[in-house]
Amino acid sequence: AQSVTQLGSHVSVSEGALVLLRCNYSSSVPPYLFWYVQYPNQGLQLLLKYTSAATLVKGINGFEAEFKKSETSFHLTKPSAHMSDAAEYFCAVSEGFQKLVFGTGTRLLVSP
Amino acid sequence: DTAVSQTPKYLVTQMGNDKSIKCEQNLGHDTMYWYKQDSKKFLKIMFSYNNKELIINETVPNRFSPKSPDKAHLNLHINSLELGDSAVYFCASSQDDGRSRETQYFGPGTRLLVL
């Protein structure tokens, strides 16, 4: 079965600093990988997804993620954090047949 | 225009009651899902329907019964509510042929509190 591990339930950064949220996956088939963001009291919104095309994927709001097969990783980065980036971030892997398996989430805190 | 909508947004009820949550999508998608997010924010799929047909049924108690009257709607009925059912329930939809892995679009969630 496929699985996702997100290291760090909380990540704190200062405004303007680099954001790095870690995601490692386990999959027996070529994975599709996703990053979703959840703002307080809202649903999930897709940031970006990897579908076996380019390994560096650019998403919305200045976020990007790099698929590294050798490291089974799909870490999310943003060069400069904004206060509005404070939210919960979920990494997910698709098992096919429409089934998404989510990580436990990482809360990003941004301080002035 | 709301792509995936859910009603109600909040639901507070007593143990033992029966309640329903409704979901509608106007994206023309073929596949709809129900997810449960617990108090620790962990998200897990419960059900998925493709063109009104049940595709995924995780190990969910049979007190939970999804119903899809048409491919734009997927409702969730819960019988004999228990304290442990308190969670946020998310509906989602995607355009799938049953084998591809397309983006899922999520609704705003229904916050259920069982007292």
Image: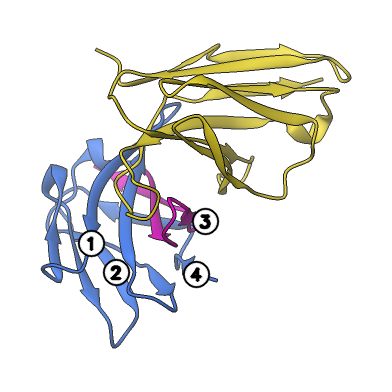
Residues shaded magenta: A87-112
Q: Residue B38 appears in which quarter of the rendering? A: top right
**Residue assigned mark 3:** A104
| Cα distance in 3D space between marks 1 and 4 | 16 Å
| Cα distance in 3D space between marks 2 and 1 | 9 Å
* Earlier-in-chain disc, 2 versus 4: 4
Given the image, what chain letter belongs to the residue carrying mark 3? Answer: A
- Which quarter of the rendering shows the N terminus of chain A? bottom right
| Residue depicted at 28% across the width and 67% down the height | A75
Chain B tint in image: yellow
Q: Is residue A76 above or below residue B109?
A: below
Do the dots labelled 2 and 4 sit on one chain? Answer: yes
Residue B21 drawn at (x, y percent): 60, 17
**Residue assigned mark 4:** A2
| Residue depicted at 14% across the width and 61% down the height | A57
Nearer mark to the viewer, of 1 and 3: 1
Residue lying farthest to the right in this orientation: B16
Do the dots labelled 1 and 3 sit on one chain? Answer: yes
Camera-side residue: B78 or A15?
Answer: B78
Looking at the rendered structure, the kind of residue marked 1 is Tyr
Given the image, what chain letter belongs to the residue carrying mark 1? Answer: A
**Residue assigned mark 1:** A50
Mark 3 element type: loop
Tell me if label 2 and label 1 are in contact, CB under 8 Å.
Answer: yes
Looking at the rendered structure, the kind of residue marked 4 is Gln
Q: In this view, does A28 lie to the left or right of A75?
A: right
